[in-house]
Amino acid sequence: MNGQVSPTLSVVIPMKNEAPNVSPLFERLFPVLYGLSLPFEVICVDDGSTDQTFSRLTQQQERYPELCVISFARNFGQHAAVMAGFNQARGEWIITLDADLQNPPEEIPKLVAAFREGHDLVGTYRENRKDPYFRKLASDMVNRMTRKISGVSLKDFGCMLRGYTREITQQLVKEREYRIFIPALAALYAKNPVEIPVSHAPRVEGDSKYSFAKLISLQLDLMTSLSLAPLRLLFLMGSAIAILGISFGCLLIILRIILGPNWAAQGIFTLFAILFILIGGQFIAFGLLGEYIGRIFQEVRGHPVYVIKQILPACSSDDKPPEQAGAERSNPL
């Protein structure tokens, strides 16, 4: 249907080292999409995989003409892969999906039904999650902090199965930030959002791409892209440290006068301990400031968010509507 009928639905799937999941995913995904009885396309973004993900995707194009494969020159991260998919998508409704089958493709009709009801942003939250306890605990912490910082009241910011209208995705691809927190920012653009429950399944093949370090990185992205609260917290921390230091200095002077110099000498290790605590607080503050400065540095350099090595012809840029082509020009490579 590519080049003949403009798709109504685009499914964007970022992939990194998901070779074992390619065939099982498509065997479940495409029957669901065919059953919707509307024009669609599937855009898979290979995020610098080092296994056979790309070759297995290209092998599937003969079987599924609706499949478009984007290959990155190297690994740029899930955020960049999703944004590349948004930039290439031609559908009026865009749904993102993980390749690991933890969000079953059979849930997609629920999102399409929400679009047909007039919603422009369809969020989802995972019921009866099958992840390890640590993952669920970390996700709960991220969700709580995200709600507090962003002011967006979503239950689950980490669920990849989400739906966006083209109007919202085009706003997102125009953002010039180094990295944006897509679910929270999309909620700011939405006029009629909704959040629906979806089922969740354990990962069968491959490993999770979200390590503890990446969860920390995600939290830093969240804090520095959506709020000035950390900077204001630094001001309060600095003020508290200054007041504490002055008070402690006054206490030392008073006790030295009352108890004599021997007491002061005997308390030197306590003084060092407190000093180290204060220095540690300063380093935390410098680390947060460095995160902000790093974001400014990335913006000033103007490096591309991603570099596409190859786009196989299933979704040619010639088929895009004029406004989509303009969006692609706004992200020069």
Image (cartoon, grey):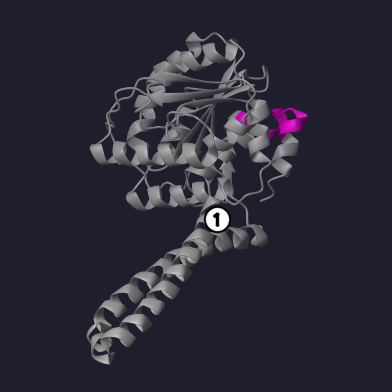
- Horizontal and vertical percent position of residue 21: 35, 32
Kind of residue at disc 1: Arg
Residue at figure coordinates x 42%, y 69% from the top left: 244
Q: Is residue 165 visible?
A: yes
Q: Which residues are magenta?
A: 315-324
Q: Is residue 312 visible?
A: no
Q: Nearer the viewer, residue 245 or 169?
A: 245
Q: Quadrant of residue 120?
A: top right
Assign the N terminus to one quadrant of the image. top right
Magenta: predominant secondary structure element?
helix
Above/below status of 29 relative to 276: above
Residue at figure coordinates x 30%, y 36% from the top left: 136
Q: Nearer the viewer, residue 68 or 304?
A: 304
Above/below status of 153 relative to 304: above
Please say whether residue 318 is one of the residues in the magenta stretch: yes
- Horizontal and vertical percent position of residue 294: 56, 62
Residue at figure coordinates x 40%, y 66% from the top left: 281
Q: Secondary structure at mark 1?
A: helix
Count the labels in the image. 1
Residue pointed to by mark 1: 232
